[in-house]
Image (spheres, rainbow, N blue to C red):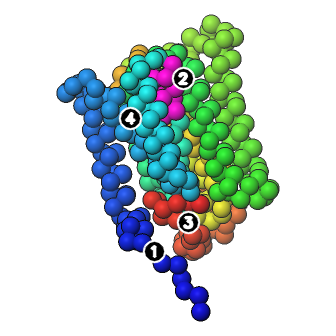
Amino acid sequence: MSRAPSTTPIEQRVGQFGASRAPLLIWAALVVLGAAALVAAMVPVGPDWLGAAGSIVIATTYTSALAARTGGRPIVFGLLALVCGLAAVLTEQELLLTGAAVSTSAIAAVLGVMGTIPAQGFLGAVRECIVALVYAGVGAMATVGFEPAVDTVRFEYVGLGMAFFGALILVNRLGAGLHGLGRRGLIVVGIGAVLLAATLLYAELLRRYGSAALVDELLSWVAWSREHLGAFPRPIETLLGVPALAYGCHMRARRRQGWWVCAFGVAATSPTATALANPAVTVEEAVLSVVYGLVVGLVIGWLAIRIDLALTGNRGRRSRAAEQAAAVRPEPSRFAPLL
């Protein structure tokens, strides 16, 4: 009879450590310490190096968390992020600091989406949107902690592009590929792609070729909102990012293809992760802008969910309650690997 291969005491201890909650607790403690250092640097309180140190900690922990969540090697990628962050800070090269900042914002944006779980009902979708934006908000502090020298518009576009490309690569595996979308899934993804392109192109075309009267009228709305409400919600977050994340989490509780809708959630997490990069915007205004976008976006997301249920589900309150109770598609817990 062949015997099972024996393990050494060291291998047994490593396996026990990996199966315990210790890695998660250590990760959470590091995130809290990094966020506290970034808050202290923003106040400011304490030594000057707190901001850079907090950014390195958040970049490292977020990278390792994203790798663990997507079935990668968290230690390898975490160490790589640590080395890159240290190199950028110690050399003080603007190119390296800017690269570290935009990479951190993209990782935070993708992690915010990957850190969500399926939502049976709308309140669960609200919770997941808040979780995603909290991830991105901490990433926003880490982004500016590197003190990059940026062109704001270009920085935001690059961060969004990197986040969206990374999310698509991961979602292609999580959502069973494009061939598994089905007709309705293709329609939903097509609408999301059109909204993303239209939002970005419209803003750019308006900036370059818009008539002075139209631009002045739109700017007056923004100015009124900033004066009376304290901020103006970002259109891409409000019209696409938050609704896609809410509807995608709702769909994931029923169909695996909901991941494709969630991919457009980076249109909410990426602007949040770069919200503090604009020196002309105060922290208070940046926070209010994200909150307003979340509230209005959730209203749009609720409408999308109601339309979907009206078209595909049975009518009546009892039927909707039964449909929600039956939406139990299995998926790993929030801190477990998805792949």
Q: Which mark is residue 56?
A: 4
In terms of image quadrants, where is residue 316? bottom right
Q: Which residues are magenta?
A: 95-105
Say which residue appears at 31% left-offset and 28% top-offset: 51
Element type at mark 4: helix
Q: Which mark is residue 331?
A: 3
Nearest to N terminus: mark 1 or mark 4: 1
CA distance separating discs 4 and 3: 31 Å
Q: Are marks 2 and 3 in contact (CB under 8 Å)?
A: no
Q: Which residue is mark 2?
A: 155
Nearest to N terminus: mark 4 or mark 2: 4
Q: Nearer the viewer, residue 160 or 107?
A: 107
Nearest to N terminus: mark 2 or mark 1: 1
Q: Are marks 2 and 1 in contact (CB under 8 Å)?
A: no
| Quadrant showing the N terminus | bottom right
Say whether residue 189 is visible. Answer: yes
Q: Amino acid at mark 2?
A: Phe
Say which residue appears at 69% left-offset and 11% top-offset: 209
Say which residue appears at 65% left-offset and 19% top-offset: 204
Q: Which residue is mark 1?
A: 7
